[in-house]
Amino acid sequence: MSKWHFLLTMVFAPMIALADGDHDHESDPHEENEKGIVEASEAKGIRISPEAHKNFGIRTLGFTSGAIVLPKSAIFFGLQEKNLYRLRDGFYKRIDFQTITKTKNEFTISSTDLKSGDQIVIEGLGFLRIAEIAAFGGVAHGHSH
């Protein structure tokens, strides 16, 4: 299966299920492996299946505290803002950050939305954004600047 065919299947099948009101979070765990978006919560973010995580090529970097140096690939550049994707308790969520310094290839950032033990997504952001749009129908609350 091509990556694009998989992506379309992972994005639109759950979107149709959510639109139909079919979001039973107590589903068969084997069924979760066939879905892209397993759970969506505006407070927590989106949880994706392990297969989607693997096929989307998502890579993360651990966060402990304070400022962190990130590759430019970790920054999601929207039309009016820049964000990071944080992984916490199995949920990916787009968050705000403050740039401390930047170079051609790296950003040193801080964020009040990060805590010790969080992971910051450094690859696969585009796929997460598509999944976020599918789950929430566009812009998640708090990101409509």
Image (cartoon, helix red, strand yellow):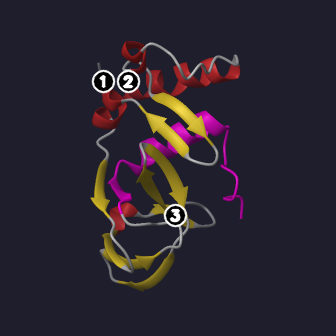
Query: Which residue is label 2 attached to?
Result: 6
In the rendered image, residue 118 lying in the magenta stretch gets the answer yes
For label 3, the crowd category at 10 Å Cα-Cα, with few meaning under 14, some 14 to 19 and many 20 or more, is some
Q: Marks 1 and 2: which is nearer the front? A: 2
Which sits earlier in the primary sequence, circle 3 or circle 1? 1
For the record, the magenta segment spans 117-145
Query: Which residue is label 1 attached to?
Result: 2
Identified at 44% across, 47% down, the residue is 126
Mark 3, secondary structure of its residue:
strand
Relative placement, left or right, of 18 versus 52 is right
Identified at 60% across, 40% down, the residue is 133
Q: Amino acid at mark 1?
A: Ser
Q: Amino acid at mark 3?
A: Asn
Q: Quadrant of residue 30?
A: top left
Which sits earlier in the primary sequence, circle 2 or circle 3? 2
The vertical placement of 127 against 32, above or below, is below
Identified at 30% across, 33% down, the residue is 55
Give me the disc on residue 98. Answer: none
Q: Quadrant of residue 120?
A: bottom left
Give me the disc on residue 83. Answer: 3
For label 2, the crowd category at 10 Å Cα-Cα, with few meaning under 14, some 14 to 19 and many 20 or more, is some
Q: Marks 2 and 3: which is nearer the front? A: 3
Identified at 64% across, 16% down, the residue is 22
Separation of residues labelled 1 and 2 (CA atoms): 6 Å
